């Protein structure tokens, strides 16, 4: 292992030059900014990583990137959760509604009308939640692909 030490232009931490894939950036900053391979840090009895010599500091720019993308990820996870809840509630109601459907669908009988409206709402829930769930999952996959550190820290 080469022990040449350089100072990162982004976070100002010292780092071993042979660990980073980018010139003038530590492995951590190269990972956050360019998606390069990260160092799985090992702080053993010291203030610096034994593998890359990074001191654990982040620049304000990287802190902002992490914060923004974590907010996006949280929003996507909430969307996935909500679509899943709607799907889980709507699916059995749709099946039950289909079994007990009134032949006139919107008949004027009070009992049949409420049952048929419930069926229509549940079918609408299923039809809306499936594409919404697929889109939210695809968005999450794309966000993690573009920002590989989201699933690693």
Image (cartoon, rainbow, N blue to C red):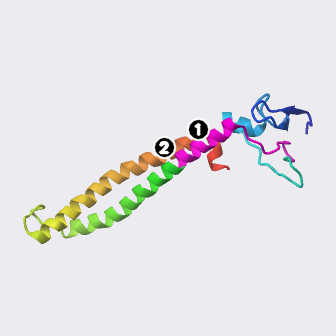
Residue 71 lies in the magenta-colored region: yes
Residue range highlighted in magenta: 50-73
Find numbered disc 2 in the image and state the secondary structure of the residue it sits on: helix
Total marks placed: 2
Extreme residue toward the top, this view: 23
Q: Is residue 65 left or right of residue 126?
A: right
Query: Above or below — where is 2 with respect to 118?
Result: above
Residue that appears at 8% across and 64% down: 107
Sort mark 1 into few (<14), some (14-19) or many (20+) by Cα contacts within 10 Å: few
Residue 99 image-quadrant placement: bottom left
Extreme residue toward the front, this view: 60
Q: Is residue 139 left or right of residue 18?
A: left
Contact between marks 2 and 1 (CB within 8 A): the answer is no
Residue 117, label in figure: none
Residue 28 lies in the magenta-colored region: no
Tell me the quarter of the image containing the N terminus. Answer: top right
Residue 45 or 84: which is nearer the viewer? 45
The reply to whether residue 56 is visible in this rendering is: yes
Find numbered disc 1 in the image and state the secondary structure of the residue it sits on: helix
Residue that appears at 85% across and 45% down: 51
Can you identify the residue that label 1 sits on? Answer: 146
Residue 35 image-quadrant placement: top right
**Residue 71 point in image, percent of width and height:** 55, 46
**Residue 108 point in image, percent of width and height:** 7, 65
Can you identify the residue that label 2 sits on? Answer: 139
The answer for how far apart the CA atoms under marks 2 and 1 are is 11 Å
**Residue 49 point in image, percent of width and height:** 84, 47
Residue that appears at 72% across and 35% down: 30
Sort mark 2 into few (<14), some (14-19) or many (20+) by Cα contacts within 10 Å: some
Residue 69 image-quadrant placement: top right
Residue 74 or 98: which is nearer the viewer? 74
């Amino acid at each position: 292992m080469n022990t040449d030490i350089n100072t990162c232009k982004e976070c100002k931490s010292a780092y071993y030059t042979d660990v980073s894939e980018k010139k003038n950036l530590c492995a951590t900053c190269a990972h956050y900014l360019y998606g390069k391979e990260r160092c799985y840090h090992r702080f053993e009895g010291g203030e610096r990583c034994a593998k890359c010599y990074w001191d654990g500091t982040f620049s304000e720019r990287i802190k902002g990137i992490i914060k923004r993308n974590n907010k996006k990820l949280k929003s996507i996870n909430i969307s996935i959760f909500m679509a899943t809840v709607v799907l889980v509630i709507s699916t059995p109601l749709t099946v039950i509604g289909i079994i007990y459907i009134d032949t006139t669908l919107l008949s004027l009988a009070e009992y049949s009308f409420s049952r048929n409206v419930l069926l229509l709402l549940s079918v609408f829930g299923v039809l809306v939640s499936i594409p919404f769930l697929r889109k939210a999952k695809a968005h999450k996959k794309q966000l993690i692909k573009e920002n590989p550190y989201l699933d690693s820290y």
